[in-house]
Image (tube, grey):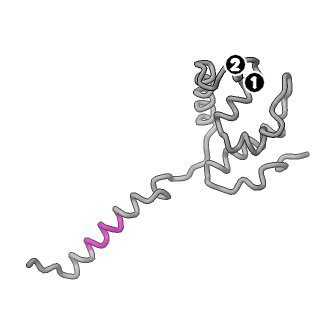
Amino acid sequence: MAYIDNNQKLILLVIFSVVLLSSSPTVLAKRHPISDAEIREKKLQCYADIESGLWGEKCKATAVDKENCALQCLSPVCYERVYQSDPLEEGEKDTVRSQEYKYCMHKHSLGQSLDDIKGSFEW
């Protein structure tokens, strides 16, 4: 039978720890704030999905319907918190909710609590 000395045990323990840590979800999902470029890229993909019919005809009816669907596609959790109860309407430019939505996406990308999103940009 092979004998393992203390140095070999230590090496095996280090190797096992590295393998275990590298497979941990928190290590694999290195949290970084979502960038404007990532948001733009994902939103363009959402628009393409909407145009292809993936989101149904209701999302292609008007420009505002398309925008509400794109916001929901981009971040369902942030759409729910910011726009769900009062979706955008024709001609509406809501800069406060737009800032809240972007802030929500930023916090969500970092895994932070979204409890304080609503009203964080009220003037």
Q: Which residue is mark 2?
A: 60
Q: Residue at x 68, y 29 (%)?
A: 70
Under circle 2, the secondary element is loop
At horizontal 84% and vertical 29% (from top left) the residue drawn is 93
Q: Quadrant of residue 53?
A: top right
Residue 17 position in % (x across, y down): 35, 68
Name the amino acid type tagged 2.
Lys
Residue type for callout 1: Asp
Disc 2 crowd, CA 10 A, few/some/many (<14, 14-19, 20+): some
Q: CA distance from mark 1 to mark 2?
A: 7 Å
- Which quadrant does the N terminus fall into? bottom left
Rendered position, 48 above or below 4: above
The answer to whether marks 1 and 2 mark residues whose Cβ atoms lie closer than 8 Å is yes
Specify the farthest residue to the right. Answer: 123
Q: Nearer the viewer, residue 27 or 73?
A: 73
Q: What is the x, y in percent for residue 71?
A: 70, 33
